Image: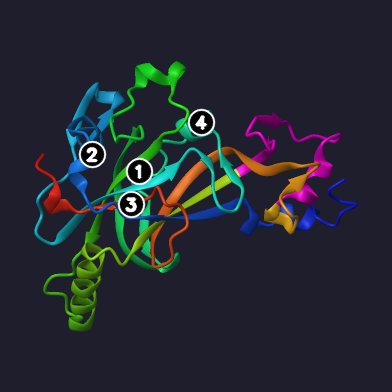
């Protein structure tokens, strides 16, 4: 059905195996629970049955916390399934932080992550079988300040950028890759159904907004539910898309 609709190349295209969702930067880091903040600071080293804290308080780094992704539907009708999002929760760590989704303009990197609920309280590993309907991936990251850089223009530009972040002028945008997808249908009453993508159901692809469709089928909203997802980084952007993704200001946190 996808081939008949002329969608085969579009679905297989590399650019259609990745997505970006814009999110605001939270302005009050004090809203995050101390347990969630601590979770982002620790990296488990299974082979040594030990853990090591991430670097903190370095004067040439700016530390920020932001919401990377939120379960549910985004504005492009891409659907972040709770199980798929939970499975991908650790994949953002150590990935690049760029400006404007430009891979040649790296401004920092992601240092840690945690799963939090709507009140920014930590969702623990023991709760995997009883996940809340809605949760966020919280990430910690550093931005390189370029203090005393040989490129004076770069130092000044970074200083100005950090000031604009504090003023709430910038947002974060999640970057993710996925290898497959199914369909999510939402009725007019809000009831949701997951439909597996196969030979019999592939006609739904032409209704997806991702591939030029109207996003509707027989009165139901149609979304693309991503499978085998990996968070590949995040970008600093000026245009919001996911109102849940916010950057938290470091100085507002008492922890």
Residue 93 relative to residue 202: left or right:
left
Q: Where 14 sits versus 205, above or below?
A: below
Q: In the picture, which quadrant includes the C terminus?
A: top left
Residue 79 relative to residue 212: left or right:
left
Q: Residue at x 36, y 16 (%)?
A: 126
User: Which element is circle 1 on?
Assistant: loop
Q: Give the residue furthest to the right.
A: 4
Q: Which mark is residue 32?
A: 2
Across and down, in percent, residue 36 comes to 25, 33
Residue 195 relative to residue 127: left or right:
right
The mark tally for this picture is 4
- Give the CA separation, mark 4 to mark 2: 21 Å
Q: Nearer the viewer, residue 210 or 179?
A: 210
Q: Which mark is residue 82?
A: 4
Across and down, in percent, residue 132 comes to 43, 25
- Give the CA separation, mark 3 to mark 1: 18 Å
Q: Residue at x 24, y 21 (%)?
A: 49
Q: Where 242 sits versus 166, above or below?
A: above
- Which residue position holds label 3? 246
Q: In the picture, which quadrant includes the N terminus?
A: top right
User: Which element is circle 4 on?
Assistant: helix
| Dot placed on the residue nearer the N-terminal end, 4 or 2 | 2
Give, as a single range, the part of the protein colored magenta: 179-208
- Which residue position holds label 1? 93
Q: Residues within 10 Å of mark 2 (few under 14, many from 20)?
A: many
């Amino acid at each position: 059905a996808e081939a008949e609709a002329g969608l085969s190349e579009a679905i297989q295209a590399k650019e259609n195996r990745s997505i970006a969702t814009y999110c605001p930067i939270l302005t009050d880091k004090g809203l995050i629970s101390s347990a969630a903040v601590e979770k982002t600071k620790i990296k488990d080293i299974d082979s040594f049955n030990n853990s090591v804290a991430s670097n903190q308080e370095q004067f040439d780094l700016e530390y920020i916390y932001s919401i990377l992704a939120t379960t549910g539907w985004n504005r492009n009708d891409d659907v972040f399934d709770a199980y798929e999002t939970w499975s991908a929760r650790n994949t953002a760590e150590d990935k690049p932080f760029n400006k404007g989704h430009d891979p040649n303009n790296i401004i920092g990197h992601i240092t840690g992550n945690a799963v939090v609920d709507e009140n920014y309280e930590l969702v623990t590993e023991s709760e995997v079988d009883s996940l809340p309907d809605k949760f966020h991936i919280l990430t910690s990251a550093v931005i390189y300040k370029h203090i005393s850089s040989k490129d004076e223009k770069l130092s000044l530009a970074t200083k100005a950028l950090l000031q604009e972040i504090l003023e709430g002028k910038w947002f974060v945008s999640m970057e993710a890759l996925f290898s497959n997808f199914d369909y999510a249908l939402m009725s007019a009453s809000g009831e949701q159904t997951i439909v597996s993508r196969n030979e019999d159901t592939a006609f739904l692809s032409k209704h997806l907004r991702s591939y030029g469709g109207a996003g509707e089928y027989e009165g139901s909203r149609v979304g693309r539910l991503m499978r085998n997802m990996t968070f590949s980084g995040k970008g600093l952007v000026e245009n919001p898309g996911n109102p849940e993704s916010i950057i938290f200001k470091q100085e507002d946190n008492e922890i």
